[in-house]
Image (cartoon, grey):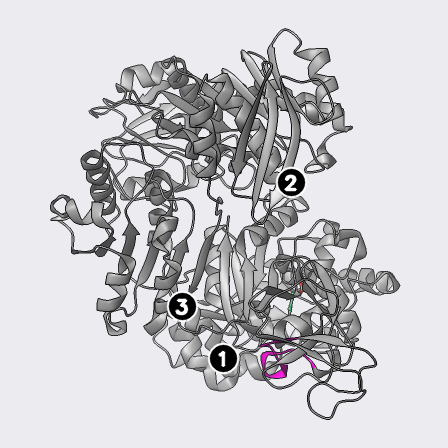
Amino acid sequence: MLKGGYEIEDFKNIIGGSFLHRANQAGIKHIVTDSRKFEFREGSVFFALSGSRRDGHSYLQEMHGKGVRIFVVSSELGIPVLKNSTIITVQNSVMALQQFAAHHRSLFHIPVVGITGSNGKTIVKEWIYQLLYTDFHVIRSPKSYNSQIGVPLSVLLMDESHDLAVFEAGISRKGEMRKLEKIIKPTIGIFTNIGPAHQENFESLNEKIDEKLQLFMDCKTLIYCRDQENIHERIQSQLSKHTLLTWSKNHEANLKIISTKVTGKKTRITGQFEGKERVIEIPFNSPTSVENSCHLWLLLLHLDMSDEIIASHFTTLTPVAMRLEQLDGINGCVLINDVYNSDINTLTIALDYLKYLSKNKKYTAIVSDILQSGEEEENLYRRVAELLKSRGITRFIGIGKQLKSHAHLFSDLKATFYESTGAFLQNANKRDFAKENILLKGSRAFKFERIADFLQEKSHETVLEIDLTKMVENLNYIRTRLQSDTKIMAMVKAFAYGAGSYDVAQILEYNRVDYLAVAYADEGISLREDGITLPIMVLNPELSSYDAMIRYHLEPQLFSFRTLEYFTEALQTSTEARRYPIHIKINTGMNRLGFDFADLPKLAERILEIDVLEVKSVFSHLAGSDDQKFEAFTQQQIADFTKAADFLSDKLPNPFMRHILNSSGILRYPEAQMDMVRLGLALYGITTSLDFQGKLKPVSTLRTVISQIREIEPGEGVGYTPKMPVSEKTKIAVIPVGYADGLPRLLGNGGGNVLISNTAVPFIGNICMDMSMVNVTGIDCEEGDEVEVFGEHLDIYEMADHLQTIPYEVLTNISQRVKRVFIQD
Ligand SMILES: *Cc1c(COP(=O)(O)O)cnc(C)c1O
């Protein structure tokens, strides 16, 4: 934003809007698009964006309640009364936001680097920053803000102090890049590479390349790798008038790579540029790092930096961590460990996330010095202090010499300072942390993983990692199969299929599912106690829990006259004033719980007599939706259910929702989606329908590390009651996961595999209670190396097959002593 903000009148003209109301506001300083993560600051304007999934117009009142007085809306209808507010109407609020960003961009005449490609955008962007922050005052997209909304928000961060900007642009379908180009207007382009991502929305690879090339239409210089033949060919035919800067190992190019030599973790790259041989050394050894570095090398040469400076900058590159971990902390705390490179924009995002957590009402931020900011310290830490204050942080712990010497800036906060991570840990007491949400945000050098170890509840080396970003992608994929007004009930029973109830429920609430369902009342109660406010259905409401359910507003499924009568009685003796929402389950062939057809007349009659109930929904459950064999049976169930629901609908005065589809039902019978669907396993990235396995992303990965490696001689055996002596010298790795962690004994003696050094290796010997052994003969591995038991690279379907069971059982068997870590991009 401009330091002085924008006048409202100018702002209105820039976005081509008109005043629906004009009140007396000073000007615009902050843009807000997401009502969920927001703490009021003076001069905030809320853009009510209407996407396919949710409509910002539903949150106008809420934002007004939080203090916002300036709104941009794209509809005049149904706008609630917003006192003392300025309301600007536009045709399309997403386009208005983009238009505003494009205008803002046009005020700056500095080099702007635009990056696109299938992979590596964020790393290249972050590395540009690492290479150039000492020479330029760089503004860059926070995290991976590269979408139709993320790009304008990034560009709007530009202000008068910046002299170099770096933005990434990502697209998934045709027509999107033109819009991003208008906003970014790069002067220098980098095309990282092309791969299969999002290919389903394009007819050919060339069509996708052409779409991406739109970003560079107007830029002066374009950097790319000559060895990517299809990229090269499309650029030659379309952008030949640009200054093209290429690098190549095999062809003539501006930067000809002569050799790359890997020693240990480093790579030495020798190249020729403008007739002169030059060398850089990077502290990485993967081919991808070399590719990314070559793009950047060309950029630095293009910026006329000297070989000495270039070489010395490259040696300082550090890995780009791109995740946020959420875990259970000691004494009921929630721990957010944000390992992104530390800067003020990602600190803002992390604080907003922290404030979103509903579990505790206290918020502590532990933050290290922000290294490599390129900004004057006094200024930087004043901004940090203001940010913390604006986000209502209860307690601040600053770690590092810079923060400590600027402690005076934090006098309005409850703040303490330590010179180093070690100094903090020496003084810290676990009792000082209880029932609060704690953010850890440290620059890499501060090794905040030590603080994370100190503050987390279990520190067993075996963890079940749950990727919440992928879970949301699965949710969104499911949404593409549904009409926009079909509601989603997310099943979080059985500890969210083994993942962890609160954290999953919270991300689902955040992503606006409509309902949650749990198996037992106590699961629902603990979600309520942790601040989850979504309606919750209970699948097995036990008689003894009815009173507690009413107290915590949990909605039972009633499946028999007995449950109906007892629940009614509980309601009549409670203080509940309004009609209480319940759900009626119909048996259509599963033959588990539910009312039968013959029961329906009497059921309708009873419900009409009872004046304390409100039938919220009527539903049934499919018995064979994942199996082609049951196609006719499934259709019959759907037809029978419809008949039953029609019958009740005729008899009962109030309308109710209908639902029958579970995950595979949603995938295979979307025409039966009715008013709501009940989404379970697909959320966790798993489906037993082969057609859809590629579309969903596995969310859970069970990881551990090697405890010990040993070699045994021919004739020796492994573990308890060894079945078979080995016939040759055998290398064994011991891993700290056993049947008490939920690793079935059936996997022992070659019954299954784990992944070590990218190779599947078999279990050897019996699985023990807390440990197991695998055969790593011929595998390059060391003690402490990572082991994947199943998940990201090693299919859970395969393990389930080995065990002759289904993935549901494998997931829900992982014991509670295995620590859950939730990660997000
Ligand atoms: C578990 C469950 C679901 C979800 O099933 P998935 O196959 O995991 O999608 C839906 N409805 C009911 C009644 C359930 O018990």
- Indicate which quadrant contains ligand 1: bottom right
Q: Which residues are magenta?
A: 733-744
How far from the left and from the top, in percent, is residue 620?
68, 67
Q: Quadrant of the N terminus?
A: top left
Q: With 396 as the anchor, is 652 left or right in this view?
A: right
Kind of residue indicated by mark 2: Pro
Please tell me which residue lies in front, 564 or 661.
Answer: 661
Farthest residue toward the front?
277
Residues at marks 1 and 2, CA–CA distance in whole angstroms: 64 Å
Q: Secondary structure at mark 2?
A: helix
Q: Which mark is residue 567?
A: 1
Please name which of the two marks, 1 or 2, marks the residue nearer to the observer: 2
Residue at left 42%, top 37%? 142
How far from the left and from the top, in percent, is residue 48?
42, 33
Q: Which residue is mark 2?
A: 287
- Work out whether 218 lies above or below 646: above
How far from the left and from the top, in percent, is residue 33?
40, 36
